[in-house]
């Protein structure tokens, strides 16, 4: 695969552009001899229109436009905003200390029950000599204390 260097491509582009310019100059010379308008001038005029000057607005005109817009919005709000009246804001409800304590105690109780149920479900019965020793150890300790 042939790789082309960037400088080589730039040189080729420069050469082709120069040839194009020479050809366009010869075409324009022939057209002037014929008596027609030069195509280059016509093409340039059509291709690149004169730069458009930025339009500005004076302060009085901006004030008139702003006043008219405020008037339109006032009219719109008058017709559309009437049904959507603001509701009276209610005072935020607050729990008493006793109620908070009651809820906290009930929550603690539920968590204790949940963890106990989870722990009992998670302990599978052990098999083998170790399981028998561990099972008999609490029974032996209980017998010793009684």
Image: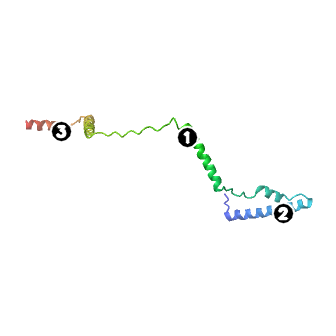
The location of residue 117, given as percent across then percent down, is 26, 34
Circle on res. 45:
none
Q: How crowded is mark 1: few (under 14 residues within 10 Å), some or many (20 or more)?
A: few
Q: Residues within 10 Å of mark 3 (few under 14, many from 20)?
A: few
Say whether residue 75 is left or right of residue 98. right
Instruction: Determine which quarter of the picture holds residue 142.
Output: top left
In this view of the protein, which residue sits in the foreground, 48 or 13? 48
Label 1: element kind: helix
* 1 or 3: mark nearer the eye: 1
In this view of the protein, which residue sits in the foreground, 55 or 61? 61
In this view of the protein, which residue sits in the foreground, 128 or 61? 61
Q: Mark 2 points at which residue?
A: 25
* Mark 2 to mark 1 CA distance (whole Å): 67 Å
Q: Name the residue under label 3.
A: 134
Q: Mark 1 points at which residue?
A: 77
The location of residue 57, given as percent across then percent down, is 66, 55
> Compared to 51, does 94 lie above or below?
above
């Amino acid at each position: 695969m042939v790789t082309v260097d960037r400088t080589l491509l730039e040189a080729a582009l420069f050469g082709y552009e120069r040839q194009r310019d020479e050809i366009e100059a010869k075409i324009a010379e022939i057209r002037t001899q014929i008596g027609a308008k030069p195509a280059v001038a016509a093409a340039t005029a059509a291709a690149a229109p004169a730069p458009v000057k930025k339009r500005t607005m004076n302060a009085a005109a901006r004030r008139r436009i702003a006043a008219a817009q405020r008037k339109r919005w006032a009219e719109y709000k008058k017709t559309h905003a009437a049904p959507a009246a603001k509701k009276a804001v209610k005072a935020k409800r607050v729990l008493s200390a006793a109620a908070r304590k009651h809820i906290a105690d009930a929550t603690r109780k539920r968590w204790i029950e949940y963890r106990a149920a989870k722990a009992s479900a998670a302990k599978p019965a052990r098999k083998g000599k170790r399981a028998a020793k561990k099972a008999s150890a609490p029974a032996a300790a209980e017998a010793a204390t009684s």
